[in-house]
Amino acid sequence: MNKQDWKILLVDDEHEFITTLAERLELRDINTRVVFDGESALLAVAEEEPQVMILDVLMPGIKGLEVLERVKRTNPAVQVLLLTGHGSTRDGIEGMRLGAFDYMMKPLNIDTLIEKMESAIDYAGKAAKLGQ
Amino acid sequence: MGRLASLLKHPLHELQGELDEVVSPGRYTLLRRKLIAIMVAASLIPLSVMAVLNYYEHQNAMAREIQNPLRVLVNKTKNSFELFLAERTSTVSLIASAYTYAELSDENKLARIFAVMQKEFEGFVDLGLIDAHGNQLNYVGPYALKGKNYAEQRWFQEVRLKGKYVSDVFMGFRKFPHVIIAVQHTTEDGRTWILRATLDTRQFERIIASMSLEPDADAFLVNTEGLMQTSSNYYGKVLEKMTLPLPPQTFEPTVLLTTDPLGREIFLSYAYFPEADFVLMAVKPKASVLKTWYTVRGDLLFVFLLGVAAVLLAAVGVTNALVRRMKEAEDRRELALREVEHSQKLSSIGRLAAGVAHEVNNPLAIINEKTGLMKDILTMQQTEFPMKDKLLAQVDSVLRAVDRCRGITHRMLGFARRMDVTSEELDLGELITETASFLSNEAMHRKVEVRIDIDPLLPRIVSDRSQLQQVFLNLFNNALAAVADGGHIEASARPEGDGVAVRVSDNGCGMSEETLNHIFEPFFTTKKGKGTGLGLSITYGIIKRLGGEIAVESTQGVGTTLTITLPKGQREALA
C-alpha cells in the first residue's frame, strides 16, 4: 500500500506536539487526521476507520487506554500505537495486553514511528487477508 | 499512658526516638543489672528466710529431742535411787519395829537378822543398835564399833529429830564409800532406840551404770555441798569437790545448757532428791548429741548454697537470654525502620525524578517535533538561501541536544522505576506465555515459530510483574527482529539452584564478538535508526535490580541465546 493511501489518526491533547507531528507526516505524504481528546477520537474512528491510530495514553477526559479498549471492541482492525509520554512501561504493557500493536515513548523518532506504522499496516493487511 | 498515646499517633517518629534510647549499650547493662537484681532478690530473700527459719526450727526440734530423753532418763534414775534408798530405809525401819529391844540387843539374834538382810538385799555392810543416848549397844559387821558413842554426831542428832536419816557418802574404814541409813523407833512405853545400817555405794554405781550412757556422757550423784557421791568420768572422784558449779535447786528434772570446766558445751540434766541431800546429774556434751544435727545442718547448708547458685545461674542466664532477645528484636526493628525510611526516601526521590522527567518530556517532545519540522522544511523544500547549511547544522545540533535530554529523562525514569520495585508472587510460565502472545500476531504473519517450554515443576517466584514483562517483551522483540521470516524462537523456563532460569533463544543472525561486548550498554544499537538502544540496557538494569543475572551467548549466523536467572524470593534482590 502506498503511503498516500494510509489513513492515520493522531490523538493527543498536546496541540503543539501533535499538530507539528501531523505536519511532518504530511510532508512525507502521509494522510493524517488530528483530534485532541478521547471523545473526538472515538467519533473519528466511527466516522472513518483509520488503519493506524497514534494514541497518547495520558489525556484529560477519556484516557488513552480506555479509548484503546473501546476501539478494539468496535473496530478491531484499527492498529493502535500508544504514546506513553512519561515513559511508563506499565501503561505500554497494559496497552499491549489490551491489543495495542506497540507502544513508543516521547520524544519520538519520526523514522521509527513511520516504520512502526508501516509494520502495523502490513500486519493489518495480512490479518485482513487471513480473515477472508 | 501519654507516651503510649503519642506513640500511637506518630508510630514511626516516636519509635525512632525511643530507639535511640534503647540502643545505647549502657541502657542494656543497666537493664540487665536491674533484672538480675530483681530476680535474685525475689528468689533469694524468701529462700534465705525459709532457710533461717528452717535452721532454727530444726535446731529447736533437735534440742527438744535431745533434752527430753535426758530429762526422762534423769527422772527415771532418780526414782531408782529413791526407790533403792526407800527400800533400804523401809527394811531397816521394819526390823526396828518388828523386833523388840531385847531381841535386837541379842548379839546372835542381830547377827541372824543381818544375815537375812544381806541375803535379801544387796549392799548392807553392817547393822547396829544404838540407844537414845547415842551408845552403840549391839553391832554386826566388819568393824568393832560396840560401845562407841554417837551422841555428838550430826547424823545422830538428825535422826533423833526427824526419826530417819540417810547420810552423805563417806569413806569408811575399809576405804570404800558408804552411806548410813539410821531409823529411830519408839515403843508405846516411850522406850527409844536407833537402828543404824551401813550401805555399800557400789549399788549407786550399778544404778548409774544401768543408765547405759555413751562413753562421752557422764552421770553421778553429788550432795548439796557439791561433794561427789559417786565417781564421775570428768568432774571428780568420790568425795572430791565437783568441778562443776551446783545448779539451782529443783526437784523436777531439768536440763541446762552450760559450759563445763573442760570447756565443752554440755547439756546438764539434774534433779535434787527431796528425801536426801543428793543431786543426780547427767551430762551429755552438746557436740556429740548434736552430731546428727550438724550433719543435717551441713546438708541444709549444702542445699541452700546449691539453691543460691542455681538461682544466680538462672537469674544471670535468663536475664542474659532475655536482654539478648530484646536487643536482637530492637536491632531488627531498628533495621526494618531504617529500611522503611530509606526506601521511603528513595521512593520519594524516585517519584520526584519521574515527575521531573514527565514534565520535561512533554516540552522536549514539542521541541523535538518543531525542530524536526524545521529540518524537514530545510531538507525537503528545494529552495536555496544563504546560510542554509549553517541553519541546518544548528537544527541538527538542537536535535542532538534533544536526544541527550531524552537519554537523561530515560535514565531518570529508569531510576524512578528502580525505586519502585513492587513485589508479588507470580507464575513465571504464565507471564512468559502471556508476553509472548503480545507478539504472536506478528510472529504468525512472518511465519516465525514461537515454542514455549515451561517446566511443570517451576516454582512460583516473588518479583515485579510489569518489569519482568518489559524484560521478556524486550527479549522477544529482539529475537523477532533477529530471525528471518520462517525462523523460530524458543523460550524455556526451569528451576535452577535456588531460583529459576529463563532461556530465550533464536536462530537469527547472531552477533559479532564486538557487538556482544556492548549489547548491555545504553544507546548501543544495531537497528540503525530504528532502535533507541535502550532495550537491553534497561533489561540488564531491571534483572540486576530484581536480584537476577543475565547472560548472552551468540554465534554469528547461528543464533542468540539470552539466559536470565531470577531468585525465588525478593529478599536477596533487596539486599
Image (tube, coloured by chain):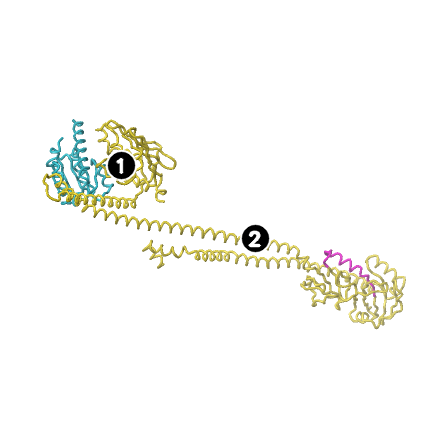
Chain colours: A cyan, B yellow
Q: CA distance from mark 1 to mark 2?
A: 74 Å
Of the image marks 1 and 2, the number of the one nearer the N terminus: 2
- Observer-nearest residue: B140 or B259? B259
Q: Chain of mark 2?
A: B
* Badge 1 amino acid: Asn
B213 shown above or below B546: below
Disc number for residue B474: 1
Using residue B97 as the reference point, say whether residue B524 is left or right of it.
left
* Badge 2 amino acid: Leu
Label 1 SS: helix
Residue indicated by mark 2? B306
- Observer-nearest residue: B7 or A15? A15
From which residue to which does the magenta span run? B196-217
Q: Pointer 2: residues within 10 angstroms few (<14), some, or many (20+)? A: few
* Quadrant location of the N terminus of chain B in the rendered image: bottom left
The spot of residue B140 in percent (x, y) is 87, 63
B238 shown above or below A69: below
Q: Chain of mark 1?
A: B
The mark tally for this picture is: 2
